[in-house]
Amino acid sequence: MKNSENEYRLEMIGISKSFGVVSVLENVNLKVKPGEIHALLGENGAGKSTLVKILSGVHYKDAGKVFLNGKEINPKNTHEGQVLGISVVYQELSLVNDLSVAENIYLHKLGASKFWMNWKKITQDAQELIDSLGFKIDASAKVRSLSIVQKQVVEIAKALSEDTKILVLDEPTTVFDPTDTKKLFDNLFRLKEKGISIIYISHHLDEIFKIADTITVLRDGVDTGSMAVSETDTDGVIRLMIGRELKDLYPTRDITIGSTPIFEVKNLTAKDTFVHDVSFSVFPGEVLGIAGLGGSGRTETAKLIFGADKKKSGTLTLDGKEIKTKSPVDAAGFQIGFVSEDRKEEGVFLPLSIRRNISVTSFKSISGKFGFINIENEYEKVLGLIEKLNIKTLNSEVNVKNLSGGNQQKVALAKWLSIESKVIFIDEPTRGVDVGAKIEIYNLINEVAKKGVGVVVISSDMPEIMGISDRILVMHKGTVYGELQKEEFSEENILRYSIGKPLKQYN
Amino acid sequence: MALALKEQLKSPGGILKFLVKYNTIFIFILLVVFSAIISDVFFTSVNLSNLLKQVSGIGIISIGMLIVILTGGIDLSVGSMVALLAVTFAILINLIILPLAILFTIAIGFSLGSVSGYLVAYQKMAPFVATLALMTIARGLGFIYSKGSPVTFKTAGGVFMSDFANNATLGIPNIAIVFFIIVIATMVMLRYNVFGRLIIAIGSNEEASRLSGIKVNKYKFLVYAISGALAAIAAIIVASRTNLGSPNMGMAWELDAIAAVVIGGASLNGGKGTAINTLMGVLILGLIGNILNLLNVPSYPQQVVKGAIIIFAVLLQRFESK
């Protein structure tokens, strides 16, 4: 390790870790230089998060060595990791909702040496830190009042409040729209210039190729090697990630779309949110994309239609008949499905088995008199869906919390596929989902549409929404700003509508 | 179920996992063996039937507590409800025919529980607060209607109930049979009935339940109402055993019920717990009291031991989640 001081900031060598009998990491190496943005890639369950958690002191490794600036380190908890200069922004937000932004940013300092805290100074410092990142957030505001994007910014600020030497970002842009992402990248480049080493985990390969210097790919807990970004391309990385050739990410659509709309929304206005005058229709067999920046009201619109938020005015028409959805119960009764973007909080029942998750919406078809469930029918139905959706599990009794993100998402989808839905709203169908599972989910969406269901997909992932939709609505400031037909699809057009600008006219 | 069990036993370390998973039952068996060794009197039919009679009342309200806790709530009012409803039953039995007295008492229990249910489900009041209020109201009403002293059974119906409560069928005390029937019914409901499935779903993720189109409020309302009805059945049983209804009955029973449910491995966050394990929790608590009585341990040290057992049981369950 003589030369390591000069060349590498961080060296993780021969790291192995298993949970019980399951081996998660086997002999993994990761070397990061000062001032380097190092992308850590791999499918869900490949071991990226575990490797990071070993670095930060959440988990303890079974074998291997970690060197920071050439000195061996063994952080036993996250506090030790922080003191060493290792800051991690995890995929799951870990903020305290009832404290202010400033208090959250300096939370780790509470309980440190001093008894009294100088709140005024802390608030000032926090404000400066956030301003320096280029985002507008009031440091004295309660975290509860922030949007999910702002919360993510606070997480990043929190990681930078220490004298950080290594910054780890685990899927930091999943909630960001392109403008915010660009801001984040500018910040990362600045930090990089300051000599901070950045480990960047993401499923968005286009991001990786924009910012990373080096790439390390993990597959099934083994690293398949590191390379400079300039030495490879997207296809090469995907090959390393999934270990096979990737033909087409997006399925070809050969579906006849019905001519009369299955579902129509007219002048829908919310009571408590800023969504107003939303009108659109979905045709049977159609995949309708809803694009827009974070905070443009996409999710709110879906929740409004589904009855989870209160409506002020507007009409919904299903199969030619006007319907009222005052609550999700009504919506589900009309065979409208809704897959939430917040899988863990709103989508699945983590502590319950796959079977119990899936059958929660379909008791009507599997239970008899007095609500007694026909267990055989239930198994048949659930096992059928597990096979069809290719959910990777030992059996139907595995708790959903033990599944990877992609498989959890499939369970959330299965819940609505198990009943015969007429319209399904899917909010961010592949957030935090690996490439392999993405393809399966796209095929699934396609298959559902084929049955004549109207599928509405909300997504911030531009290639995704263009790849799977037949038509795209773009939302801006709480209403539908524009509609794009297939031949008009482009990132530029979506973006122009997203920020409230007309399309460029080419004469 | 059987299939999953078989697979589990076959998997590596499966037997250990099995032991940890069913730890409540093993604690129970250990306690039985320990009690049998330490005391000659323990395994006599008189002692065992006394034990069962003692736990039946608390056992029934523990089942109500379980279904409330499964939704992520808590019902602090059940102990006081037992007092109020025991007084109510004693008054009613002296006024009207027995079947009506039983029916009305249960209906009143259901209605009182509905008040908690309404406050929690539709007024979004914290379960702890709503049922705390109901707890003091019920205790107060019990004293008002009984004028502060026990109301004794005076009619033939009272004699019948007293006979029923103090006799046994096939060696099992009748009131324990009532308790066991409720346990089995709850077990079946939780496993094979939509109602049971949905309250577990609500307890494990209320928002996801709402967005799955489940009538969350209706079910939250119902569990408190059912808990109230079960408190009424417990009240009828304890009143019948002693031939009277007293406003002092059921003192701090809500705490024993919570303890039994927790020893039975349920999570106070909701979504986790079974009727059979709650039964074990009830029996474990009863057994501890019973064996300590047989050993002539005074009641204060008994409380210390009970507390220690609760801590031990919950610590053991942490292995399960790991």
Image (cartoon, rainbow, N blue to C red):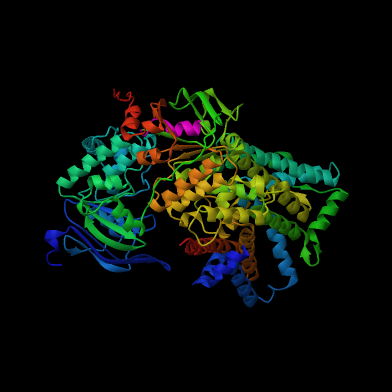
Q: Is residue A264 above or below residue A162?
A: above
Image: magenta residue range: A293-304
Residue closest to the far right: B156
The image position of residue B266, as x and y in percent, is 56, 56
The image position of residue A93, as x and y in percent, is 37, 45
The quarter of the image holding the C terminus of chain B is bottom left
Position of residue A393 in the picture relative to residue A421 (left or right):
left
Residue A97 visible here:
no
> Which quadrant of the figure has residue A71?
bottom left
> Which quadrant of the figure has residue B284?
bottom right
Q: What is the tally of numbered marks visible in this picture?
A: 0
> Which quadrant of the figure has residue B145?
top right
Residue at 73% across, 50% down: B233
Q: Is residue A197 above or below residue A66?
A: above
Let me know if residue B72 is in the magenta part. no
Position of residue A325 in the picture relative to residue A403 (left or right):
right
The image position of residue A238, as x and y in percent, is 33, 54
Residue A414 visible here:
yes
Foreground pick, A159 / B111: A159
Q: Is residue A265 above or below residue B283?
A: above
Residue at 56% across, 52% down: A385
The quarter of the image holding the N terminus of chain B is bottom right
Position of residue A441 in the picture relative to residue A8 (left or right):
right
The image position of residue A184, as x and y in percent, is 26, 40
Foreground pick, A418 / B203: A418
Residue at 71% across, 68% down: B48
